Image (spheres, rainbow, N blue to C red):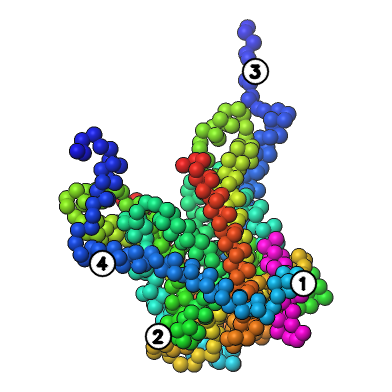
Amino acid sequence: MVAEAEPVALRATGTVARRQALSRASRYVLLAASLVGVAVLAFLIYDTIDLGASRLSWDFLTNYPSRFAERAGLRSSILGSVWVMGATVLFAFPVAIGTAVWIEEFAPRNWLLTLVKLNLANLAGVPSIIYGILGLAIFVRYFDLGPSIIAGALTLSLMIIPMTVIAAQEAIRQVPSSIRDGSLALGATRWQTTWNHVLPAALPGIMTGVILAVSRAAGETAALIMIGAFTFIAYDNTSLFDDFTTVPIQIYQWTIRPQEEFRQNAAAAIIVLMVAVFTMNLVAAIIRERFRRE
Amino acid sequence: MLEGATAAEVHSLLRKRPLGRLGERAILASLVGCAAISFVTMGLIIYVLVSESATFFQEVSFAEFFLDTEWQPLFKPTSFGIWELVAGTANVVLWSLVLALPIGLAAAVYLSEYAHPRTRRLLKPILEALAGVPTVVYAYFALNVITLDILRPLLGTEHLSVPFNSLSASILLAVMILPTVASISEDAMASVPRDLREGAYALGATRLEVAGRVVVPAALSGIVASVLLAIARVVGETMIVAIAAGSTPNLTLSPLESIQTMTGFMLQVGLGDAARGTIDYQSLFAVGLMLFVITLLFNMAAQVFVGRFREVYE
């Protein structure tokens, strides 16, 4: 009878086994590390809702601020935020897209373009509080606009233009050059090509960038405090030259109060702000995903 | 004429056609005008910072600014030694990096080398959402949750007599920069060519060894860039440090003391509505100039490293 061969188990032993075990274990350690961010975010959301949700009501959204926590509301700060955001988009959007179009479609490929790009990258890294003191010195003091909505919006526009330009450039670059060549070959001018073919194709990407920039401006606090928007506003804004306050500034005012009731107000206002910011981010993500496939 | 020309040549020829109509010239001029705004912005930032700082330095000597170790601008006798504020900034940079660097890099390695593509598509946006949270929200958590609900009960009120410390700010700053470190490092790791990994696997390396000894070293310039960008963000962040770290200029790297950063001081002056022409108002710009130079250096260094890793693999 022929002895049956023992089945050979291909198992590493010694050092190799140790190295493999280490590698297998590392998966879980590294997974845990990448979940830290998610866990923190979940905890922050849970904690805010736990404290602030009971404070949310129609009155909270429509009352003016007050030194009595239970009567204070977000009316003037929500209106202020909407005014400033609207004006910021109006100022920043055309300039940012114009810059991106010039860089990608018209600029001569030379040292000047390199300098423009370098300058934009550096501006995108300038801290928001520096934009705040720029706005203070130029718009509030030199042009004498005071701590007004228009001064705030111009300040925030300068702050978000660089990041919007970079996002818009990215979107324009994604448009295949065959589309441009086809249009140019049929006799369209460069501007007709850009306006009729490149910009429509790049629009989803540009919108994504704009929405993300606006959501950053919506949460901005320091730059607006620097231009003097840390004020008590108990009326509805009706003009670009009104003084104003915004939701993040209201959160700041409530956070630095030691009383527990104001902490609860801050938590409730955070829920409002986070819902707005996450909605914008979600819309941006949906636009990006939907148009990526095509 | 075009026969035998490559697509790229045709493309560049088409691009070079002169702008025909007058309207097109006007449009081009307005586009150039848009692009010029970014130069004007940078010019104005530098002009404002330098000109206001110049008047500041007429009253305060360079020697006092750079050699004195006390920052006491609001009460007499005043003293303007920038180092206490720089130390405050260095303090939060140090502790936020101690926390964010290992976690961010581990997350980057996991997402790039271990995660199923579906897991990565799910996890990366959530991680990046952390960068979209307004910093005043993080500031609220640093003060209320980390300091009052966690650190104080843990360490005792005697260690944290005032509710301000650099640790609480650093923890939330670390959360804020986690996406910067993880996402940019992950991009760098993902662009390491497959051949390098496969070569290492063929030699019998495990996944951890491939990640640690091949991918991370190959992606090093991208990782360094992510860390430099993260540092620039921490240096420039205002609300978290202003609310949670205190307003006590303090020459210390201890995480449990109340400190003040450069940005924290600037916000304090901004809240006080300093009148133009006063030394407070001018000190704002002197500190701003220092802050601007430091963040600019870190950002430019980051760009150098990003450029380097692009050069190698793209």
Q: Residues within 10 Å of mark 3 (few under 14, many from 20)?
A: few
Chain that bears disc 2: A
Q: Residues within 10 Å of mark 4 (few under 14, many from 20)?
A: few
Q: Is residue B271 above or below residue A181?
A: below
Magenta range: B70-94
- Asked whether A238 falls inside the magenta stretch, the response is no
Mark 4 residue element:
helix
Q: Residue B136: give x, y in percent of width and height.
A: 58, 74
Callout 4 touching callout 2 (CB < 8 Å): no
Same chain for mark 1 and mark 3? The answer is: no
Q: CA distance from mark 1 to mark 3?
A: 78 Å
Determine the residue positioned at 34% across, 64% down.
B32
Mark 1 residue element:
loop
Callout 2 touching callout 3 (CB < 8 Å): no
Q: Which residue is mark 2?
A: A240
Amino acid at circle 1: Thr
Determine the residue positioned at 64% across, 10% down.
A3
Q: Residue A135: give x, y in percent of width and height.
A: 50, 78
Q: How many marks?
A: 4
Mark 3 residue element:
loop
Name the mark on residue A6.
3
Name the mark on residue B69.
1
Amino acid at circle 3: Glu
Q: Is residue B238 visible?
A: no
Point out the tag, 4 or 1, that comes first from the N-terminus. Answer: 4
Q: Is residue B183 left or right of residue A12?
A: left
Determine the residue positioned at 74% across, 79% down.
B79
Q: Is residue A108 left or right of residue A277?
A: left
